[in-house]
Amino acid sequence: MNTKLISKVKGQIQKTGKPFVFTAPEDNDESQVQFQFLGSKDGKEVVYDAFLYTLEMEYFAKIHEEATQLVIDENPKFKGADFDVMDGPHIEALEEISAELAKSDEYDVAEFIEERPEDADEDGIPLDVCLNVTSITEEAIVKFVTEFNEGTLKLDDTVYSFDMWNEN
């Protein structure tokens, strides 16, 4: 592990007094955050580079991805369309297919942590963390980091689905 990175993260943690440092604050919102924290792996101090997001976000991302592909398969004219805009005929088709997919248990999700292979940038050990919380707050991050490092983190293996049309 890059000792410069460990020193840098350690210094930032000491400055803030929090057990983590945000790495992409401009991309963070209540459903997802990117941050780094110190931990250990194989008896060595390491930096984890975490992407933490809500279970609800994982659910809708899975449905959106599958629905987008189905819309394109059924309507090849939409292949270059922007599926992140709010309106258009491709969005109407996306919403219809998404609603149908949401009725299936196939897209139910459960909490998980996935360690991805380290990248050449040496930004730490990449972790994808998906938790069943309503929003990602500093308290949720601190709780995760503490439990992860103490070995007390218990993931909920219950599978969940979410209401697509809930505006709350």
Image: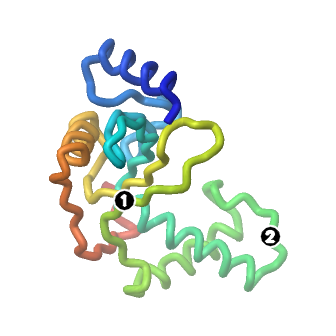
Which residue sits at x=45%, y=39%?
34
Compared with 122, 125 (above or below) is: below
| Rendering coords of residue 70 (x, y %) | 66, 81
Amino acid residing under circle 1: Ile
Tell me the quarter of the image containing the C terminus: bottom left
Q: Which residue is situated farthest in the front direction here? A: 43
Which residue sits at x=38%, y=15%?
11
Pointer 1 local density, CA inside 10 Å: few below 14, some 14–19, many at least 20 = some
Element assignment for label 2? loop
Amino acid residing under circle 2: Lys
Compared with 158, 86 (above or below) is: above
Residue under pointer 2: 79
Query: Can you tell which mark lies on residue 113?
Result: 1
Q: CA distance from mark 1 to mark 2?
A: 32 Å
Q: Earlier in the sequence, mark 1 or mark 2?
A: 2
Residue 91, located in which quarter of the rendered image?
bottom right
Query: Can you tell which mark lies on residue 90?
Result: none
Element assignment for label 1? strand
13 horizontally vs 119: left or right: left
Residue 142, located in which quarter of the rendered image?
top left
Work out whether residue 37 or residue 4 is closer to the camera in this orientation and state it: 4
79 horizontally vs 70: left or right: right
Res. 112 in view: yes
Which residue sits at x=42%, y=68%?
59
Figure disc tally: 2
| Rendering coords of residue 36 (x, y %) | 41, 34
Which residue sits at x=38%, y=27%?
21
| Rendering coords of residue 159 (x, y %) | 28, 76
Q: Nearer the viewer, mark 1 or mark 2?
A: 1
